[in-house]
Amino acid sequence: MTGKVRVLVVDDSAVVRQALSDILQSDPEITVIGAVPDPYAAAKRLQQEVPDVITLDVEMPRMDGITFLRKIMTQRPIPVVMCSSLVELHSETLMQALEAGAVDIILKPKLDTKQGLMEARIRICDAVKGAARARLSRGARYRTEMRPVEKKLTADAMLPPPVARQSMARTTESVVCIGASTGGTEALRVVLEALPADCPGVVVVQHMPERFTAAFAKRLNSICAVEVKEAADGDTVLRGRVLIAPGARHMLLRRSGARYHVEVRDGPLVSRHRPSVDVLFRSAAQYAGSNATGIIMTGMGDDGARGLLEMRRAGACTVAQDEATSVVFGMPKEAIGLGAAERVLPLEALAGEIQRAKPQ
């Protein structure tokens, strides 16, 4: 046993299979044990060796990816990362994949620019390594978190570091900031479905591919009492409204008088992500202070841990999801280790925490 994450790539395109294999093999913590064109070939490969993670195309001949995913989760649960090239066309299908047990979703790599390839590599490798550590519904393996080796930019790349705590005028409205990654799509559904229509305003960073966040927000909006929408630059934070950062854009909290709004902007990867939880949390520390509540949820890595500490130092109420209910106890664990979380709560208690949020 090498200790590497063993991956089986399933995609009907030979070009994509090669590109994904090359990207995954470039990470010293990952090895590709096979690359096959369809679910039938994958089933035969699984009889020989069970991988730690499967990357699975959505549309394939003979059997589509969702059908194969459901068979996997029923017969032999293995962490699956869905891979798509046309998110806007497959958004409903991909939502079904998450509900069927897929751990994460990635876009097929774009090979047209060096920057695009680099960012695709980071996203794909992190998604696969996060999936390898995921707790599945039927008790999948849970591995110790492995640290990424690439140099990471901090929130300094988007806004200046916090200065000594300043007094901030209190408002009658509070704002709740949530950060999540691997496992967060379903965890957020659980939390947001439990919120009443008059809950405090919520802003969310969920690590998710570009163009998929709009479909995610639309789906949540259809099942929740609160309004859920993909954030647009200048959107106001209102009671009963949840704003979700768009994929591939950072979201910052700003304040004008007694009102809060969001700023959506481009920028580099921060803490290996765009949008970054650290960016949102730092902006909340600077512009909301004790009027804010910060919640860090399931996910791999440490994005949001330092930002949550900044929020706590600015007087905000801060919470981390507990290990037992986290699909991957990476981000909450890092925040707890820094002393950033005042409280550690299970998933089912987070909606109540949001409803109780009020300026300190």
Image: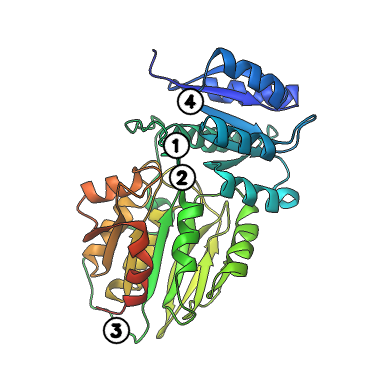
Identify whether 252 is placed above or below 267: below
Along the line of sight, the residue nearer the viewer: 14 or 322:
322
**Label 2: few (<14), some (14–19) or many (≥20) C-alpha neighbours in 10 Å:** many
Q: Is residue 188 left or right of residue 312?
A: right
Circle 3 sits in a helix, a strand or a loop, which is it? loop
Q: Which residue is mark 3?
A: 170
Q: Which residue is mark 1?
A: 130
Q: Earlier in the sequence, mark 4 or mark 2?
A: 4
Q: CA distance from mark 4 to mark 2?
A: 16 Å
Q: Position of residue 349 (x, y in %)?
A: 33, 64
The answer to which image quadrant residue 283 occupies is: bottom left
Q: Are marks 2 and 1 in contact (CB under 8 Å)?
A: yes
Q: The disc labelled 1 sits on which kind of residue? A: Gly
Identify whether 226 is placed above or below 220: below
Q: Is residue 347 left or right of residue 47?
A: left
| Picture disc at residue 52 | 4
Q: Nearer the viewer, mark 1 or mark 3?
A: 1
Q: Nearer the viewer, mark 2 or mark 3?
A: 2
Q: Nearer the viewer, mark 3 or mark 4?
A: 4
| One can see residue 163 in this view | no
Q: Are marks 4 and 2 in contact (CB under 8 Å)?
A: no
Q: The disc labelled 3 sits on which kind of residue? A: Arg
| Picture disc at residue 182 | 2
Q: Earlier in the sequence, mark 3 or mark 4?
A: 4
